[in-house]
Image (cartoon, grey):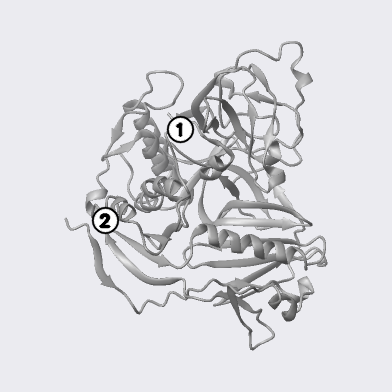
Amino acid sequence: MDRRPSSAINENVDVGSSLVITSVLLAATEMSYAQFASLADESFRYDMAVSKEAPPRLRATEPVVSAEVWLVGAVTGEERQNLPDWVPKGHVSATELKHFNEELASRAPAHQGEVTYDPDITFGGLTAAELDDLVFLAYDLKLTVEEAANRGTYAGSIARLAAEWEFRPGYTGWGFQGETPYLTWKSPIPDDVLTDLEYLPYPEVRIHESNFGLTQLEAASNKLLADLTGVVPRGTTIFTDMDPSSGTIAVTTSSPFVNGKVARTHTSPSFEVTYSVSSDIKYDGAGVAHERQKSLGSDPSASVALRGGANFSGCTSGFILISTTTSMKRVGTAGHCATHGTSRIYRNHPADGTQAATLPSPITYWWDGWDWGHFASGGNGTLQTFYYDYEDKRYVEGVGSPGYGQLLSVFGYTTKARKSAIVSVFSRSCARDGGRTHALTVMDRRKTTGGDSGGPWFSGNDAYGVHSGVCLDTNTNSFTRVSIFPVQGWKVWIR
């Protein structure tokens, strides 16, 4: 099969692509056009709206995408759908899900009690964990198995590469346009990246060559957020959403002056600005009682095997982390779960024993604008596993960086069930009265509740993030991606 990049470049594709930053509603922020325009620097130009109904748009001085290249992938659609005949096809009913789970348990029983399924058995090229997620995603999101495979199970092959690319110069992002995956990279795209793409399990991959990288886009987003924070009224929550595929940074704000109802939503082909009454950032660890160390009594040092997805006294443990320079292990969770400066009580799911452990020495990056942190193991053992469902465990075997349109799952101890959602925003930053939270990946719906903060977001055996909560009253979940943890000297401990 010819796996070279296609020479057919569509010069006429209307990508609508400039670095676009939309303003917030002038009435809500009491900010004039002149004030907004004063935030510009030499990197941007302004397209002032003709109509007062529309805000000005901030654009990069050069187009984002110079060309769209189609790369021939490693398989055809027919070759990929080589799943066992006992795996459901099309939409999955509750009865079919139950029968599938029973069949999988009989074919891939774990030879030891630490994980639910044997991690080394594969079916149609998929591990038991991947196959389990595939059918569950179809059922939970009301998709067909084929759709869940395309944007869920097989998407991990791109996400694992993206986790490695994220710190390389030029990498911008990836995602799906319909059912076709795309990669955006600042031109020129390295040859080794093109080679990696040729072997993905997709019939074709779109490559967008841009004039910016992810670090430049993040810097522009952070600058805009900082500048807007200085001019909006106190008590107003702002968030900026980055779209690496087009270079768009969209701004949404809340007004504290509206009486209890959504005031107005304005959309047009060039921008979308939503006004809501939410005046704070809500996290799924807030408002839940924090169990103190003294409640353990006289023996807080009993050895407990530590994993992700466990009860963490008002939060949920994420993944076990390991230092990038030493063999030290710590228990990851959400940053706002580690802000008290005290220990937390850890408990496994009941089937793994009722002993509790005190985990001391919290470190949080919350005050630096990142909603993740970790605790010392307290002398307890650590394992490379996590609870992906209530009483069910699997190994962590890789790390993925999420892409737009990807299907992912989450487990939180309060919800006590695996839930799924679709990536809708790669990176969101929230700000209110000087406090900021960056790098939140946002999903298309909310499936969690208070006490689920810190829980693992995952696909198959790959770790993607630790659960955070909700920014503004958007009713959508968000998490901090684990692929950025090495910046602070930590990474997910994988098998």
Report the disc number at residue 478: none
Out of 98 and 228, give the one closest to the viewer.
Answer: 228
Amino acid type of the residue that numbered disc 2 sits on in the rendered structure: Gly
- Determine whether 487 is above or below 330 in the image: below
Question: Going by the image, does 145 lie left or right of 213?
Answer: left
Q: Residues within 10 Å of mark 2 (few under 14, many from 20)?
A: many
| Quadrant position of residue 26 | bottom right
| Image quarter hosting the N terminus | bottom left
Q: Residues within 10 Å of mark 1 (few under 14, many from 20)?
A: many
Q: Which residue is mark 1?
A: 396
- Which of the numbered marks, if any, corresponds to residue 73? 2
Question: In the figure, 448 relative to 341: above or below?
Answer: below
Kindly identify the amino acid type of the residue bearing the numbered disc 1: Val
Question: On the image, which quarter does residue 108 sit in?
Answer: top left
Residue at the image point whose x is 64% and y is 88% from the top = 50
Asked which quadrant contains residue 187, the reply is: bottom left
Residue sitting at 42 percent across and 40 percent down? 133
Q: Is residue 276 visible?
A: no
Q: Secondary structure at mark 2?
A: loop
Separation of marks 2 and 1 at Cα, in angstroms: 27 Å
Classify the position of the C terminus by image quarter.
top left
The reply, left or right, for residue 279 in relation to residue 468 is: right
Q: Is residue 72 visible?
A: yes
Q: Residue furthest left?
A: 1
Could you tell me how many numbered marks the image carries? 2
Q: Secondary structure at mark 1?
A: loop
Q: Position of residue 222 (x, y in %)?
A: 64, 60
